[in-house]
Amino acid sequence: MILRKFALLFSYIFHPMIISLAAFWILIFFNSLQSPNANIILFTCFLFSNLIPIITVIILRKSGKLSDIDASIKEQRILPLTLGIIYSLLGFLALYSLEAEKIVQGLMFCYMTNSIIMLGITRYWKISIHAMGVTGPIAALWVQGYQFPIIMSVIILCVGASRIILKAHNPAQVYTGAALGFLLTFTQLHLFFL
């Protein structure tokens, strides 16, 4: 019972939306070329990767299209993932027009492309969105030089273990999500945004 409470706590503290906002904040405000419109850029990131998706999940939950806020049922993930792809595309275009740092644009782009891949996988198998959503921003921070392997590994392990303890995923779904999130983001950032 206590283990389950800790797992639930870790799932919420290190939720992908919290990690994404923290990563965007670090990438925007802790670099040598801070944009003069940094606050607008952060708000844009928050709007398209946090606020609109959260409102969407709440609406889908209240309308009965999601049985819970985690979209635990594989088939129910298709609509929120599809909408998430659209939101990330709009966010990327907005960041591009605001001339945000390439790494910031890149992370938003990776949310879109990673979600497309996640959507394809979800049609056949339930991959861990939590694991993928945590390791993607960690990869972006790593690429930008914020390399804290112990802290980052602890976060990834805690999120992964919490998803397994909560019986949201099996180990293969968590490992695959974590590996894909990191590798896809790392590769895309290096190929297109550095």
Image (cartoon, rainbow, N blue to C red):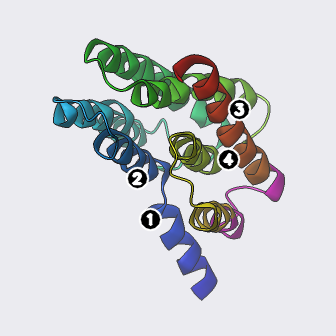
Q: In 3D space, how far apart are the residues under numbered discs 2 and 3 (Cα atoms)?
A: 23 Å
Of pointers 1 and 3, the one earlier in the residue sequence: 1
Residue sitting at x 67%, y 57%: 168
Q: Looking at the image, is mark 4 or mark 3 nearer the viewer?
A: 4
Q: Secondary structure at mark 2?
A: helix
Q: Quadrant of the N terminus?
A: bottom right
Q: Secondary structure at mark 4?
A: loop
Query: Does the stretch in magenta take in 171?
Result: yes
Labels 1 and 4 touching (C-beta < 8 A): no
Q: Could you tell me residue 194's position as x and y percent? A: 54, 24
Quick check: can you spot residue 102? yes
Residue sitting at x 32%, y 21%: 95
How many other residues sit within 10 Å of disc 2, few (<14), some (14-19) or many (≥20)?
Answer: some
Q: In 3D space, how far apart are the residues under numbered discs 1 and 4 (Cα atoms)?
A: 16 Å
Which of the 4 image quadrants contains residue 122?
A: top right
The residue that disc 2 covers is 18
Q: Amino acid at mark 3?
A: Thr
The residue stretch that appears in magenta: 161-172
As rendered, which of 150 and 115 lies closer to the eye? 150
The residue that disc 3 covers is 122
The residue that disc 4 covers is 128
The residue that disc 1 covers is 13
